Image (tube, grey):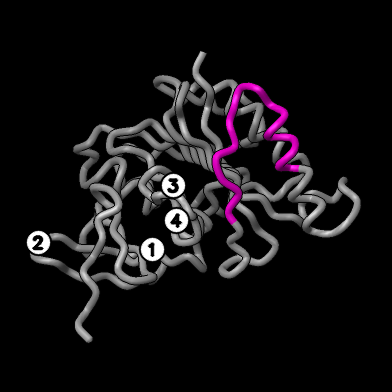
C-alpha cells in the first residue's frame, strides 16, 4: 500500500493517517526533538499527541478537527504553557514564519523554570508572548491582550480548574470563540469519588453556565491518562 495522502486540516496543520504535522515557522529547528520533514519548500514538524493534549484532542474528536483549531492570524490565550511544546505548534499555524499572519498567542506559565525555556522559544517566534504568572488571575492576563481572544486552551493542574476556565472564558473569549479545557481528574480533589464523578461534575458545571455551550467532551486517556478535553463555544448575545 502507498503512503496515505495528507489531509489539510487548516493552513498550517495537516493529518497523515494517525499523525499530525504543523508547518514549521522556524525552519531547521525542533522544539522537543520531534521529527521534521520537507515537502517541496515547506518543512513540517510532527505534533505528537503523547506530548500535547491539544494534538490528542484533534485525533480523538468526533467533530471536524478544523473546528477546534484557531484560525490563521487569531488572538489566542494559552494558560499553562509549560516550556512551550504545544504552544509552538499553535504558533506554527496562527502566526507562521516571522509572524506574517499577524497572530498573537499570550502564553501564561507560573513556573520560573518552565518560563526560561518558554522565553527562549519566544525569541525565535514573533507573535508568541510569554507571561510569568498565575493563569487563574485576569489581572495577570489583561495587560498583554490587544483584544478579546478567538481561542483559549487551559492546562493547569490545580483544584477548581473548571471554575477558573469558565471565569477566564467569560471575561476574555469573544462571542462564538472556542475554548479547550484539558482537565486532569486527579487535580479535582475536592470532588468525592473516582475519575468519572469528577468529569461528570465538570460537565455539569459547564452545562449550567448560560454564557457558553459545551460542544464536545473528548476522552484523551489513550494518550494521556486521567484526562478529558472539554470543548466549549462562547454564546453570542
Q: Earlier in the sequence, mark 1 or mark 2?
A: 2
98 and 90: which is toward the camera = 90
- Residue at image location 8% in from the left, 65% down from the top: 40
Q: Are the residues at dot 3 and dot 2 in contact (C-beta closer than 8 Å)?
A: no
Disc 2 designates what residue?
41
Quote the CA–CA distance across marks 1 and 3. 20 Å
Spatial CA span between label 4 and label 1: 11 Å
Point out the tag, 1 or 3, that comes first from the N-terminus: 1
Q: CA distance from mark 4 to mark 3?
A: 26 Å
Residue that badge 3 annotates: 119
Instruction: Give the residue at mark 4.
Output: 58
Range of the magenta residues?
202-218
- Contact flag, marks 4 and 1 (Cβ < 8 Å): no
Q: Residues within 10 Å of mark 1 (few under 14, many from 20)?
A: many
Residue 85: tell me if it is visible. Answer: no
67 vs 92, left or right, is right
Q: Which mark is residue 47?
A: 1
Amino acid at each position: 500500500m502507498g503512503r496515505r495522502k495528507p489531509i489539510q486540516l487548516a493552513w498550517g496543520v495537516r493529518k497523515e493517517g494517525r499523525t499530525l504535522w504543523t508547518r514549521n515557522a522556524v525552519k531547521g529547528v525542533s522544539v522537543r526533538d520531534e521529527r521534521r520533514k520537507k515537502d517541496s519548500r515547506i518543512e513540517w514538524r510532527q505534533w505528537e499527541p503523547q506530548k500535547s493534549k491539544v494534538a490528542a484532542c484533534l485525533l480523538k474528536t468526533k467533530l471536524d478537527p478544523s473546528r477546534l483549531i484557531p484560525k490563521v492570524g487569531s488572538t489566542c490565550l494559552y494558560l499553562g504553557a509549560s516550556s512551550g511544546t504545544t504552544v509552538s505548534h499553535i504558533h506554527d499555524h496562527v502566526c507562521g514564519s516571522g509572524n506574517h499572519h499577524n497572530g498573537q498567542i499570550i502564553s501564561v506559565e507560573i513556573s520560573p523554570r518552565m518560563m526560561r525555556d518558554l522565553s527562549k522559544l519566544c525569541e525565535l517566534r514573533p507573535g508568541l508572548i510569554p507571561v510569568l504568572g498565575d493563569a487563574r488571575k485576569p489581572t495577570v492576563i489583561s495587560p498583554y491582550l490587544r483584544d478579546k481572544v478567538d481561542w483559549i486552551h487551559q492546562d493547569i493542574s490545580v483544584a477548581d480548574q473548571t471554575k477558573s476556565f469558565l471565569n477566564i472564558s467569560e471575561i476574555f473569549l469573544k462571542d462564538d470563540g472556542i475554548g479547550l479545557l484539558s482537565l486532569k481528574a486527579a487535580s479535582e480533589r475536592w470532588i468525592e469519588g473516582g475519575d468519572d464523578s469528577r468529569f461528570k461534575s465538570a460537565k455539569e458545571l459547564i452545562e449550567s453556565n448560560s454564557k457558553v455551550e459545551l460542544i464536545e467532551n473528548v476522552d484523551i486517556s489513550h494518550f494521556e491518562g486521567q484526562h478529558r478535553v472539554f470543548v466549549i463555544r462562547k454564546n453570542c448575545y
